[in-house]
Image: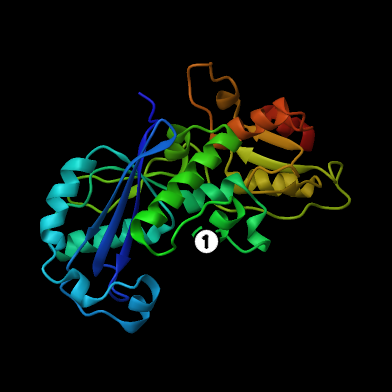
Amino acid sequence: MAITNFIALDVETANSDFASICSIGLVHFRGGEVFKSLTILVDPEDDFSRANIGIHGIRPEDVAGKPTMATVFPVIGNALRGAAIVHHSPFDRSSLAQAASKYGTDGLLCTWIDSLQVARRAWDSFGTNGGYGLKNLASTFDIQFNHHDAAEDARAAGLIMLRAIDETKVSLQSWIDDIGYESIDGAAPRPFKRKTDWKRHSQDGNQDGPLFGETIVFTGALSIERAEAVQMAAIAGCRVADSVSKKITILVVGDQDLRLTEGQEKSSKHRKVEAMIAEGAPIRIVRESDFMMMVG
């Protein structure tokens, strides 16, 4: 069954040690809206640095007598088992994995999706316009929040995730399939087996090539190595991009992927381009075999 609801999560730490969690924010999104929110203060059993206090405002006296992660993990672990967890940047996922290692317990057995990675693929305009940090994205999308309050940061990440889903027409399930992580017993979160290759291959095309002026993106499983396909496209004159944007003119899809029936999942790039074409974008979707003839 496709995942539609999720829990947004954010953590704050007492110092630069990722395991020194002092606050966890959890925001449950149901049906595209905030359902409920929870902040958990945690005794990190560690020193607080001035720098971190200056960021989130949590002091040692605020967590005195609060539960440690040894107590918190079993509680939230049961509550979040099997859930889809949205977080902004790898920090939160890594922090919880480090804390689990510190206390000799299993981490959260759930599915993870990083809204920062999603944003980089959903919108290409922020690379030179303030970056993909939570504060900049929230400001652009008019999301009001109290930055570095764990529950507030989690809520902002969840709202950014919803906006990306709405604008790209790519489902939460498809984002998870493409760039999500999974947790299993006794191990840190690890990437799912990918349907698509997100390794960066962008480069400019040969100005003398027959396809000069075209901007191309690849998606799906190709019969040749992605790097080889990129090189062929560049020699033929195509500018090769890593992500879908209004600038691209050609999307190359693996032959098998292009024959997917309605009930099967397509890559997020493929779905995004289909949505853009429906809105009038002049982009062509071609099979790998057709691409080979174009550059041959």
Residue at 39 percent of width and 55 percent of height: 152
Q: Mark 1 packing: few (<14 Cα in 10 Å), some, or many (20+)?
A: some
The structure's colour scheme is: rainbow
Q: Residue at x 39, y 73 (%)?
A: 55
| Left or right of residue 57: residue 48 | left
Where is the N terminus found, in terms of image quarters? top left
Name the residue rendered at 78%, 33% in the picture: 294
Which is nearer the eye, 124 or 202? Answer: 124
Could you tell me which residue is drawn at 39 percent across and 26 percent down? Answer: 2
Where disc 1 sits, the SS reads helix
Q: Which residue is mark 1?
A: 135
Decide which of 160, 255 is in the foreground and name it: 160
Q: Looking at this rendering, what residue extends furthest in the bottom direction?
A: 50
Looking at the image, can residue 221 be seen? no
Q: Answer with the quarter of the image where residue 50 lies.
A: bottom left
The kind of residue on which mark 1 rests is Lys
Vertical placement of residue 23 versus 49, above or below: above
Hey, which quadrant is residue 91 in on the image? bottom left
Provide residue 209's location: percent of width, then percent of height: 85, 46
Residue 242, can we see it? yes
Query: Residue 224 location, x and y as percent?
Result: 59, 39
- Classify residue 216 as left or right of residue 135: right
- Where's the C terminus, which quadrant? top right
- Tell me how many marks there are: 1
Residue 236 at x, y percent in the picture: 80, 45
The residue closer to the viewer here, 280 or 39, is 39
The x and y percentages for residue 192 are: 37, 42
Q: Nearer the viewer, residue 178 or 79?
A: 79
Compared across the picture, whether 198 is left or right of 228 comes to left
